[in-house]
Amino acid sequence: MGSRSSSRIAMGPPGGRIDKEEWDLVISRLFALQKHKPESVRIREAWSFDRQNHGDAAVLNAHTLVKRGDTVSLYEWAHALRSFVDSPLLRGHRLVALGHSAGATAWMLTTFSPPPIPYTALFLIEPTITPQHVFERELAERQSYMDLVVQLTLNRKSEWTTKDAAYTYFKKRIPWSMWDDRAVSMFVEYGLHDAPDVRRGVTLKWSKEQEAASYPDTKPHHESAVQLAKISKAVPVHLIWGERVEFMPEYLRDALSDPNEGMDVESVSYVEDAGHMVVQEKPDALAEVIAAKLDSLTISVVGGSRAKL
């Protein structure tokens, strides 16, 4: 454990088809890289979170999710995260928030709560934060892509006879075949459970209908873009992209670091040979990029300027 001044980091919540455990590989590498650092900059603790309809949370909330009949909005997700951030557990500690995909939007939405901003820095990894005017300018292309993602999600296989059979299935198919093998194993171990009907083997912990319903929910991504422009002037924001352009086209990537859009991000980094699912594809390389930025963290001070830790 580090000193009282050392940082805590909050991983996730994961976007798309991953559970909180998928962050474990990144976390393990980060702690290994930090092991010999001075206590004042060493990571004290790391937390990762499931969305309310992902992973173990989806199992715990299964009855409620079926009863309510709709998906969990990013606003609900952000509210739960901010409740954790404001808890006594984190009082007196510096907090660095890391979000992947829709998780980046969720963390950005937590900054709408009353000031001050509770973070020393934010790391947005393959964020789906999207300026509304850019989205509307490319509406036909964005809508077509969104419809495709929804259809692929609904048509995705979600049941297997055993976890071994599921592992074999994933290893032969994109995107899982592009993942680090450890991430595939963790996905099988923590993302699947016994089907309610034991004769059906194992199934995904979360509903693909719940996942598909979340993709058209674009308003939070637009609102978080407005907030990013404000936050980036006071708190260091680090953007990390996979080298391969997949879920977020270049014009959306560029918009999040464009001064003409009001953005003032601290840095933009790329992880080689990785795409949107960089957390699973290149967990060690991602951790190394994060660690390098953690070493040079800045903090907000009175007046919105920045000072070295």
Image (tube, grey):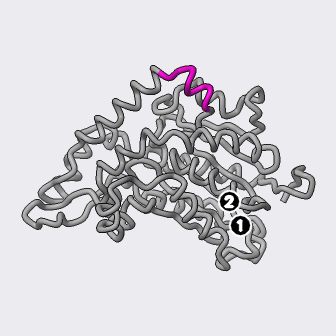
Task: Look at 24% across and 42% down and name the residue there.
Answer: 156
Side (left or right) of 248 relative to 114: left
Of residues 65 and 239, the one nearer the viewer is: 65
- Quarter of the image for residue 40 reads bottom right
Of residues 140 and 157, the one nearer the viewer is: 140
Look at the numbered disc 1 and give the secondary structure of its residue.
strand
Give yes or no for residue 135 being in the magenta stretch: yes
Side (left or right) of 63 relative to 122: left
- Label drawn at residue 96: 2
Task: Look at 43% across and 44% down and name the residue there.
Answer: 281
Q: What is the crowding at mark 2: few (fewer than 14 residues within 10 Å), some, or many (at least 20)?
A: many
Give the Cα separation between the discs numbered 1 and 2. 7 Å
The residue wearing badge 1 is 7
Side (left or right) of 262 relative to 224: right
Task: Look at 51% across and 44% down and name the residue there.
Answer: 101
Give yes or no for residue 209 being in the magenta stretch: no
Please, which residue is most extreme toward the front here? Answer: 68
Q: Which residues are magenta?
A: 132-139
Is the residue 74 above or below the residue 255 in the image?
below
Disc 1 + disc 2, Cβ < 8 Å = yes
- Quarter of the image for residue 1 reads bottom right
Three-letter code, disc 2? Val
Look at the numbered disc 2 and give the secondary structure of its residue.
strand
Three-letter code, disc 1? Ser
Tell me the chief SS of the magenta region: helix
Is the residue 246 above or below the residue 53 in the image?
above
Task: Look at 76% across and 59% down and name the residue there.
Answer: 117
Q: Position of residue 246 (x, y in %)?
A: 46, 30
Mark 1 vs 2, N-terminal side: 1
Image quadrant in which the C terminus is located:
bottom right
Q: Position of residue 300 (x, y in %)?
A: 84, 55
